[in-house]
Image (cartoon, grey):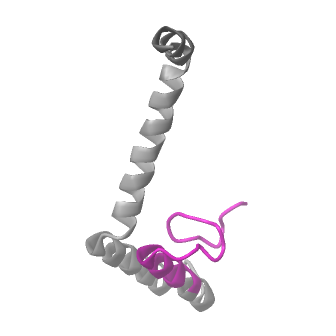
Amino acid sequence: MGLISLLFGWPVAPLRGVIRLGELIQEEVEREMRDPTVVRHRLEEIEAARAAGLISEEEEALQMREVLQGMIGGPDPVGRVGGPARRDEGR
């Protein structure tokens, strides 16, 4: 039985490696999202974008809520990730 497992398991070994790599990346991203220093920096970026007039008050509140939700492990209410949105984005 060991030889059969070896023969049939070997071709999928690279796939297992890719899956494990994806899991490690996901773990690192989640760890970073909960890092207080990263979260504080992100909140400061959002505040700066609002002060510069790049985002509205509503967008600021939404993005701050997303950052805080990510920190506590809650679902992303809008399903988007990234930096402060700009008004001219998507044009």
Front-most of 85 and 3? 3
| Residue lying farthest to the right in this orientation | 91
Q: 1 or 86: nearer the eye? A: 1
Q: Position of residue 43 (x, y in %)?
A: 40, 80
Q: Residue furthest left?
A: 37
> Mostly what secondary structure, the magenta segment?
loop
Residue 10 image point, x, y percent = 50, 14
Residue name at image x 41 percent, y 61 percent: 30
Span of residues in magenta: 62-91
Which residue is at 39% across, 54% downward? 27
Whether residue 41 is in magenta: the answer is no
User: Which x, y percent locates residue 61?
Assistant: 55, 88
Residue 57: image quadrant is bottom right
Rendered-image quadrant of the C terminus: bottom right
User: Does residue 66 belong to the magenta stretch?
Assistant: yes
Q: Is residue 4 left or right of residue 37?
A: right
Residue situated furthest front in the rendering = 1
In the rendered image, residue 55, in percent from the top left (x then y), is placed at 57, 80
Position of residue 18 relative to residue 8, above or below, is below
Residue shown at 45%/81% (left/top)? 68
For the image, the number of numbered tags is 0
27 with respect to 7 (left or right): left
